[in-house]
Image: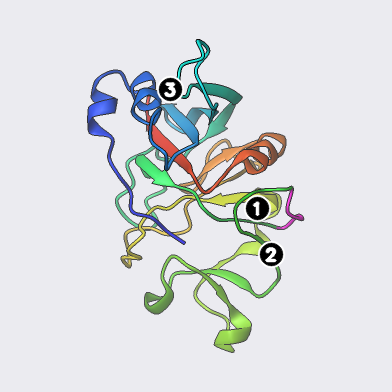
Amino acid sequence: MYIEKTRETPAVAQGLWAGLLKAYQSRNDTDRLIFVCCKGGSRCRVQMYAKTGTGDTGSSIPSWKEILSCDGYAGRNGIGKQAEGDFKTPDGTFRCVEAFGILEDPGTQVPYTKLMPYHYWSREPETYNRMVDMRKLRRIPDGEHLIDMDPEYHYALVIGYNPGNIVGKGSAIFLHCTGSNPYTAGCIAVSEADMKTVLKNVTAGTRICIYPE
């Protein structure tokens, strides 16, 4: 489910977003980029890019096409997550290879789980930071009852934060739909329409880049 977080230090240092586009331009393992530009507090700008086959000049070097640009919300206490419950969104570059939602699959290319009442996101040591099925556990686990997050989890994309499932480092970090608050508990939120666009365009080669403006 998860792939290790990677810091794109050289790209960030040379100009952040333009540098990230350039850094992933010729990489075969990445064909989508989601930029989360954090503006201070919980405010952010979310942009999604798709890699085209060739550049505008017909060269063999791929180019990027913007397919989404919208406002969004980060954690209540901004970015720079350190621990479970700090209400901060993690910063860095992460893979996004799985999705879920209360609503039906909108047509995504990554594995999608239609949420049922038995789905939880675990905070227990043995299954920390993973989706679990209470039917298999034969008990109610300690964790987030995903289907209760309505409308936030109408659609959600799992952000691969804490791939080692280190207890206490933070869990349940998603890109999901906005709710009633102008902030999240540590995720990124956009409108439901924009979230649907994200899921229709996301691939296994997607990376999400979360950095300050």
**Residue beneath the point at 33% across and 22% down:** 19
User: Which quadrant holds residue 27?
Assistant: top left
Query: Where residue 18 sits in the image (x, y, percent)?
Result: 38, 19
Is residue 47 in the magenta section?
A: no
The answer to whether the residue labelled 1 contacts the one labelled 2, judged by CB atoms less than 8 Å apart, is yes
On the question of residue 88 being in view, the answer is no
x 41%, y 70%: residue = 128
Residue type, label 2: Leu
Q: Give the secondary structure at mark 2.
A: loop
Residue 59 visible somewhere in the drawing: yes
**Looking at the picture, which amino acid does disc 3 mark?**
Ile
Local crowd at mark 2 within 10 Å, few (<14), some, or many (≥20)? many
Residue 61 marker = 3
Cα separation between marks 3 and 1: 37 Å
Rendering coords of residue 57 (x, y %): 50, 10
> Which badge, 1 or 2, comes first in the chain's sequence?
2
Determine whether 118 is above or below 71 in the image. Answer: below
Residue under numbered circle 1: 153
Nearest to the observer: residue 157 or residue 201: 201
The magenta span reads 102-106
